[in-house]
Image: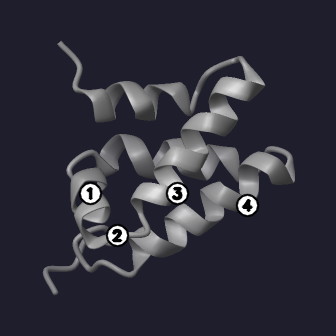
Amino acid sequence: MATELEELLGFLSSPLPQVKKAAVDIVRDLTGSQDGVQRIIQYSNVAAPSLARLLGENQEVSVPAAEALVNLSENPKFIGKDG
């Protein structure tokens, strides 16, 4: 059974724009805290490509996706370094 975070990350690929927008906003907000970053890093194999795909969307979706990626990239574990 999928965790809540796995379900949330799945919504980043939703065909429904309003669902995708809500999901990316929540992910971006989660990346604003170290606890949220640590939780998302556990699923970086899903989160990174899902957020990267959103960079080609309209600004309503691409801007929060870019902000989330920037926040995540500040953590060495996300970019594959041990720190």
Q: Quadrant of residue 38?
A: bottom left
Q: Quadrant of the N terminus?
A: top left
Which mark is in front, 4 or 2?
2
* Whole-number angstrom distance, CA of label 1 to CA of label 3: 13 Å
Distance of mark 3 from mark 2, alpha carbons? 10 Å
Residue 26 on image: x %, y %: 51, 46
**Which residue is labeled 2 in the image?**
33
- Spot occupied by residue 80 in the image (x, y as percentages of width and height): 25, 71
Q: Is residue 35 left or right of residue 29?
A: left
* Residue 17: quadrant of the picture: top right
Disc 2 residue type (three-letter)? Ser
Relative to 64, say whether 76 is above or below: below
Point 42% across, 75% down: residue: 73
Answer above or below: position of 18 versus 21. above
Q: Mark 4 or 1 closer to N-term?
A: 1
Question: Which is nearer the eye, 6 or 29?
Answer: 29
Q: Which residue is mark 3?
A: 28
Mark 1–mark 2 Cα distance, whole angstroms, equals: 12 Å
Separation of marks 4 and 2 at Cα, in angstroms: 18 Å
Q: Amino acid at mark 4?
A: Val
